Image: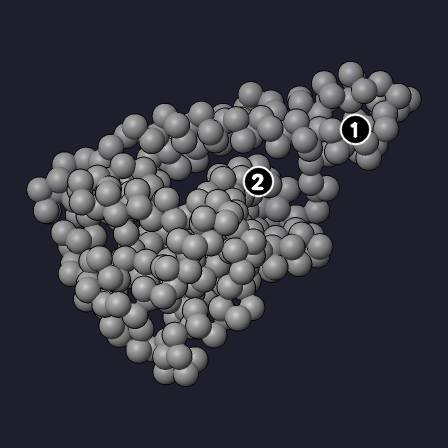
Amino acid sequence: MGGLFIVASLVALASIGIYGFPLDGSVSLLLTFAATAVFFGGLLLLVALFRERPDSPIGFTQEFLAHHASWDRLMRHVPLILLVSLFLPAFSGIKGSISLFATYSWDGFWIEADRLIHGMDAWRLIHPIVGYPFVTFILSALYIVWLPMLLIALVYFSFLTNRPILRAQFLLTYFSCWATLGSLCAIAFASVGPCFVHPLVGREDFLPLMEYLDYADSQWPIWVIHIQDRLAAQLAEGSRELGAGITAMPSMHVSMAFLYWLAARQVNRWLGWVMFGYMLSILVASVHLAYHYAVDGYLSIILTLLIWKTCGHLAARAHPLQKEVEPPFSAPSTEVTALNN
């Protein structure tokens, strides 16, 4: 799926006279991916040492690394790492070119859909609850955390080889959501979202929300406001660098947060509850921080769930004889016994 998307992106960009996409971000992604893997590998080793309390920590560490970080095992992940380092820049290339593929003409439709569902603009409905600068600051921080989680979740599930079906389901859904929701749907339903609807479309519906966010930023640092300014500048420059581009429908923030919850609840019940809370926070933040209409998030949840179910069937068919029984992130029991003797 990821490779097909990269090829399709190159063809689509070439059709409008753009050949290739910036690869500056690929090196950064490779280094970040490696650093994330090393960090969490070390963290998991510490957890395993605390849990097993071996008589020989050095010997246990050697066995742990031999089992989980062997050269052959690491090499099996190199294609995926390279794929991701090209996939996300390709996505940014498409996202940064949406205005060349389509006209941002759907904002009015989504605004009216929001009002039809909620009886008013969705941000006004939640503002009495979250419309306090400190709460806005917290939601903004959670929204920023979403960025490193893109790689953290990918690293975790990439190395979750003891759960081959869940691993395949997550990775298939991850790439499919970016390709389908983040690119195809973003072009088909091109909209800029509340924070850009005034400067780019000319509607003043969300000026009160933007005025509140400016006020909140004067009380607490609301980092997303400055990211929005940078996105607007990148659009004016025609930038297609990593992270560039403006699109509201559907919300990839909500899509990915919802995916994390779907996958996390199958790993650990408490982790599932944490990610459920995070998903709800992102859904609220996407509206409160003026990035999205509420319907952007609703449609993202529906489409992500459909993709998740479909990819689950495909993953199960691809691994018909696999059993997910190996305890995650621990040395094999025989090795642990040997170390403790």
Which residue is drawn at the image coordinates 78% and 17% (left, top)?
A: 59
Q: Which image quarter holds the C terminus?
A: top right
Q: Disc 1 designates what residue? A: 49
Residue 286 vs residue 77, the one in the foreground: 286
Horizontal and vertical percent position of residue 119: 41, 83
Which residue is drawn at the image coordinates 72% and 42% (left, top)?
A: 327
Q: Amino acid at mark 1?
A: Leu
Q: Disc 2 designates what residue? A: 156
Which residue is drawn at the image coordinates 33% and 66% (left, top)?
A: 206
Horizontal and vertical percent position of residue 88: 35, 40
Residue 215 vs residue 5, the one in the foreground: 215
Q: Is residue 195 left or right of residue 304?
A: left
Q: Is residue 101 left or right of residue 228?
A: left
Q: Secondary structure at mark 1?
A: helix
Which residue is drawn at the image coordinates 39% and 74% (left, top)?
A: 121
Q: Amino acid at mark 2?
A: Tyr
- Between discs 2 and 1, the one toward the N terminus: 1
Please say whether residue 197 is visible from this viewpoint.
yes
Q: Residues within 10 Å of mark 2 (few under 14, many from 20)?
A: some
Q: Residues within 10 Å of mark 1 (few under 14, many from 20)?
A: some
